[in-house]
Image (spheres, grey):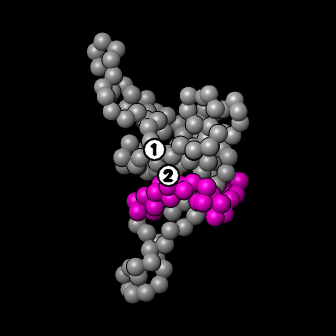
């Protein structure tokens, strides 16, 4: 997903309403961009919810000695994925929350959601085999691992 789209999606772990508990998919999900806020949205409708600003600096010193440096883009995405999937509540509690549009253009995020949906459709078509059976393996709505 990251290789093809430059972002990854992570399903949210909590339900927002009692009616969401029986839904097939998650009540909300996140889009993770490199060096940009994490964006929460509703998968069914595409409604954009919030931007969560978090930073994972490279504390190893990087080139040029001590100090704080940004992680490489893929490492930044991986750090956000690891943090969200291991302790979503802590990440969200510690993040600076803003309405969508503070740092990311909502039109860009909606375009990325459309690209993600197209990417998932293409993956689903590739999984289908003659006779209507599907090959084994993780689905596009799987664990949210970055290898999807």
Q: What residue appears at the point 71 percent right and 36 percent down from the top-left corner?
A: 17
Magenta span: 74-103
Where does the image place residue 130, in percent across and percent down from the top left?
Answer: 28, 15
The answer to whether residue 67 shows anywhere in this view is yes
The quadrant where residue 128 appears: top left
State the residue position of label 1.
Answer: 144
Q: What residue appears at the point 50 percent right and 68 percent down from the top-left corner?
A: 56
The nearer-to-camera label among 1 and 2 is: 2
Is residue 96 shown in magenta? yes
Q: Quadrant of the N terminus?
A: top left
- Calculate the distance from the C-alpha at mark 1 to the C-alpha at mark 2: 8 Å
117 to 102, vertically: above or below = above
Dot placed on the residue nearer the N-terminal end, 1 or 2: 2
Where does the image place residue 137, in percent across and percent down from the top left?
Answer: 33, 33
Q: Tell whether label 2 touches label 1 (CB within 8 Å).
A: yes
State the SS at label 1. loop
State the residue position of label 2.
Answer: 85
Between 29 and 143, the residue placed more toward the observer is 143
> Crowding near pointer 1: few (<14 within 10 Å), some, many (20+)?
many
Q: Is residue 54 left or right of residue 19?
A: left
Q: Quadrant of the C terminus?
A: top left
């Amino acid at each position: 997903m990251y290789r093809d789209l430059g972002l990854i999606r992570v399903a949210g772990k909590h339900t927002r309403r009692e009616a969401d508990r029986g839904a097939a998919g998650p009540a909300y999900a996140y889009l993770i961009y490199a060096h940009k806020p994490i964006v929460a949205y509703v998968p069914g409708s595409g409604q954009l919810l919030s931007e969560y600003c978090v930073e994972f600096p490279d504390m190893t010193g990087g080139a040029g000695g001590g100090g704080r440096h940004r992680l490489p883009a893929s490492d930044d995405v991986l750090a956000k994925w690891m943090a969200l999937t291991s302790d979503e509540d802590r990440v969200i509690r510690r993040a600076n929350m803003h309405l969508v549009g503070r740092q990311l253009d909502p039109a860009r995020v909606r375009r990325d959601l459309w690209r993600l949906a197209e990417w998932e459709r293409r993956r689903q078509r590739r999984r289908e085999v003659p006779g209507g059976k599907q090959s084994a393996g993780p689905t596009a709505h799987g664990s949210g691992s970055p290898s999807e």
